[in-house]
Image: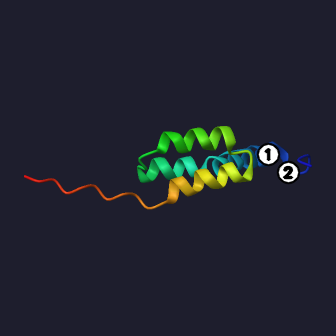
Amino acid sequence: MFSSIGPLGVTLFSLLSVVVYLLPSLIAFNRGVENRWLVLVINIVFGASVIGWLIALYLATRKVKAPLPRIS
């Protein structure tokens, strides 16, 4: 399958696959989601199944709770 694209193509494909696999975790850490470590664990452990990956994506993209106003 990969014999016609060469080593550079295989490397780029592998890198792209890892980025897509970890996309929910990257989104969660970039957005500063409260449970970002939970998203990472779910993504790594259950991400190979489509359902686990979708759950991690949901947790990473849901609306962040607004912080309570400080009373001075």
- Mark 1: few/some/many CA within 10 Å (<14, 14-19, 20+): some
Given residues 63 and 12, the one toward you in this image is 63
Is 22 situated left or right of 65 in this image? Answer: right
Residue 8 is left or right of residue 5, and the answer is: left
Residue at the spot x=64%, y=48% of the render? 19
Q: Position of residue 42 (x, y in %)?
A: 61, 42
Q: Position of residue 17 (x, y in %)?
A: 71, 49
The residue beneath circle 1 is 10
The x and y percentages for residue 64 are 40, 58
User: How many numbered dots are placed on residues in this image?
Assistant: 2
Q: Residues within 10 Å of mark 2 (few under 14, many from 20)?
A: few
Q: Which amino acid does label 2 sit on?
A: Ile
**Residue to which mark 2 is pinned:** 5
**Alpha carbon separation for disc pair 2 and 1:** 7 Å
* Residue at (53% x, 53% y) in the render: 59
Asked if residue 34 lies left or right of residue 48, the reply is left
Query: For the view shown, which residue lies furthest in the left direction?
Result: 72
Circle 1 — which element? helix
Marks 2 and 1: CB-CB under 8 Å?
yes
Amino acid under disc 1? Val
Location of residue 11 by image quarter: top right
- Report the front residue among 21 and 61: 61
Q: Please, which residue is most extreme toward the bottom here?
A: 63
On screen, residue 52 versus residue 1, left or right, reads left
